[in-house]
Image (cartoon, rainbow, N blue to C red):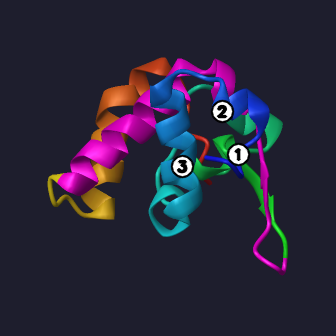
């Protein structure tokens, strides 16, 4: 947590957990869509709600979008839970699509 921005460090625990999980699991989160409408700001997965870039040295620049978006955080919390239950990334994506599709359009191309 000490490498997270101050805004994330002072956020609710569920938001902190979501940021930590997204940063630590790009291989999962880059394959999970978001349905909050953030595709309009260039996000291409739920991962982009948390991380805007990673430089060549591995330094992460965090996106503050998920700080104020419960849909982003809920999707990540569901992904965390389903991964712990042994679900595959395609199964998690299918769950997210079925559960959150009612909120809008997927941000994944």
Displayed quadrant of residue 69: top right
Element type where label 1 sits in the image: loop
Sequence-wise, which precedes: disc 1 or disc 2? 1
Is residue 32 rendered magenta in the image?
no
Q: Which residue is mark 1?
A: 4
Between residue 79 and residue 19, name the one nearer to us.
19
Q: CA distance from mark 3 to mark 1?
A: 8 Å
Near mark 3 (Cα within 10 A), the count class, few <14, some 14-19 or many ≥20, is: some
Left/right placement of residue 101 relative to residue 44 reads left
Sequence-wise, which precedes: disc 2 or disc 3? 2
Q: Vertical placement of 94 versus 16: above or below?
A: below
Sequence-wise, which precedes: disc 3 or disc 1? 1
Q: Which residue is mark 2?
A: 9
Q: Farthest residue to the bottom: give it.
A: 56
Q: Are marks 2 and 3 in contact (CB under 8 Å)?
A: no
Q: CA distance from mark 1 to mark 2?
A: 6 Å
Between residue 81 and residue 59, name the one nearer to us.
59
Instruction: Give the residue drawn at x 54%, y 35%.
Output: 16
Displayed quadrant of residue 6: top right
Specify the segment rendered in magenta.
56-84
Q: Farthest residue to the front: give it.
A: 2
Q: Which mark is residue 20?
A: 3
Left/right placement of residue 38 relative to residue 56 reads left
Main SS class of the magenta portion in the image: helix
């Amino acid at each position: 947590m000490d490498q997270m921005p101050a805004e994330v460090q002072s956020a609710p625990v569920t938001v902190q957990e979501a940021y930590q999980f997204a940063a630590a699991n790009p291989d999962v989160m880059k394959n999970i869509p978001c349905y909050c409408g953030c595709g309009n700001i260039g996000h291409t997965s739920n991962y982009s709600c948390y991380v805007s870039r990673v430089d060549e040295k591995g330094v992460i620049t965090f996106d503050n979008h998920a700080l104020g978006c419960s849909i982003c955080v809920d999707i990540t919390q569901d992904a965390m839970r389903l991964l712990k239950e042994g679900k595959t990334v395609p199964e998690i994506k299918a769950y997210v699509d079925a559960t959150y599709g009612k909120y809008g359009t997927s941000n994944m191309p």
